[in-house]
Image (tube, helix red, strand yellow):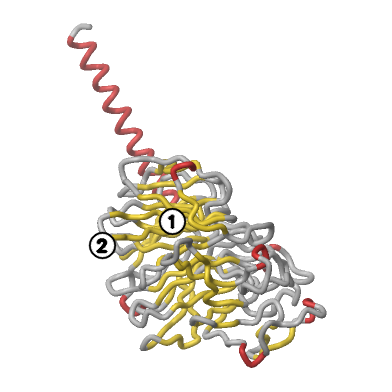
Amino acid sequence: MDNLTWKIKRGLTVLSCLGLLVLSASNQAIAQTNSPVKVPAGLSFQKLPAQLDKPRLMSFTKEGDLIVGSASGKIYRLKAPYTQSEVLADFGGYPHGIALRNLAAKQELWVAETEGLYRVDYDSKRTYKRADFIKVVSLPGGAGHNSRTVKVGPDNMIYVSLGIAGNCSIQYLDESFPFADRRGGIFQLQESASEAKLVPYGSGLRNPIGFDWHPETGQLYAENNGPDNWGFDKPAEVFVEVNNGSFFGMPWYQVIDGKVTVDSCTGTSKAPLSTSRVELPVASFPARSAPMDMQFVAANQLNASWNGSALVALHGSWAIPTGGGAGQRRPPELVLVEFDNGKATGKVSSILSGFQSANGTRYARPVGLAFGPDNALYMSSDAGDVIGIFRLKNIED
């Protein structure tokens, strides 16, 4: 090849690369411009280019790796700057919940799948097979509300939540019930014995997908997906304060307009506890909002006025009001449950909205939430026009 030909080819290559860069930047700008999401002043909301299939809950490792569970059977890993994903493990089943726990010199990756809680020592330099994971304990499985959420508490203990199968399933977190029917609340995993054991912590919740601990008080809170059998507007989805032994009534009781009400759908089944034991919510969302994950905001994370309050991902409803259309479904949204001096005020405000158009189509549906080492909030979407991971951060960061 002569020198002139080489220069021409080199020039064309450079122009081609520049063209790709411009096109990539242009497409990104178009994607940002066309996003219908309404974002608070001072914050930016961006879709990351990493490709994932049906991502659900997420957690960060101490090295800053983002680990993502999914409804596709795969567990994903994204390394900073989180623009590319890799399959950390082709786990199979429904590895919905992901948590990381630090113990001395090692870091454990916990996975909550429908019928079991699994653990493996995490190494940021390797990938895994299903057989690499140890099954720590079986979980009550079966159809209906088959997601399982696992998190590490401030006591470094493992907690896992699961829902009852349907609206009126006679299931309860108590050893008096068959193992398959110990559903509807939050378990604490006790590992001190020779064999790990699930111990009921908070019960009577229909489908508590999201839970987290207040960063200052250490108090546990959870939100709950309410039943479908009361119509489109009742009962409200609840946000509750959970203590060891808390009972929230479902499926035998519902909180309707602030009052504990018997749910007749359970027929002649006798409730395990009386109405006087039912604890009331500290905040609520409109019925059919479908709350997913939640994260408390700590110091230096996003808006300073949100410190100590809880962000909740609302997935949005499939239900349509009588005589209505798809555009009247509860929309996907990110909301803030406001706290003051460590206590919920009952006020809920919108943070990210505009995910649903007037005709009912959806841009994205929030599911998982996790704060990264950069103090930005990462959010997964498993459905809608855009599936993947978004980042909400301060513009000046």
Closer-to-camera residue (247/176): 176
288 over 144 or under it: above or below: below
- Viewer can see residue 139: yes
- Point out the residue furthest to the right here: 268
Where residue 185 appears, x then y in whole percent?
58, 72
269 over 1 or under it: above or below: below
The amino acid at mark 1 is: Trp
Closer-to-camera residue (1/298): 298
**Residue beneath disc 1:** 110
Helix, strand or loop status at disc 2:
loop
- Point out the residue furthest to the bottom here: 276
| Few, some or many residues within 10 Å of mark 2 (<14, 14–19, 20+) | few
Alpha carbon distance from label 1 to label 2:
31 Å
**Residue beneath disc 2:** 397
Where residue 320 appears, x then y in whole percent?
72, 67
Q: Nearer the viewer, mark 1 or mark 2?
A: 1
Mark drawn on residue 294: none
- The quadrant of the image that shows the C terminus is bottom left
Residue 177 as seen in the image, left or right of residue 75 = right
Helix, strand or loop status at disc 1:
strand
Where residue 102 appears, x then y in whole percent?
31, 60
6 over 204 or under it: above or below: above
Where residue 174 appears, x then y in whole percent?
62, 74
| Few, some or many residues within 10 Å of mark 1 (<14, 14–19, 20+) | many
Residue 191 as seen in the image, left or right of residue 319 = left
Q: Are marks 1 and 2 in contact (CB under 8 Å)?
A: no
Residue shown at 34%/40% (left/top)? 126
- Point out the residue furthest to the top here: 1
The amino acid at mark 2 is: Asp
Residue shown at 43%/53% (left/top)? 119
- The quadrant of the image that shows the N terminus is top left
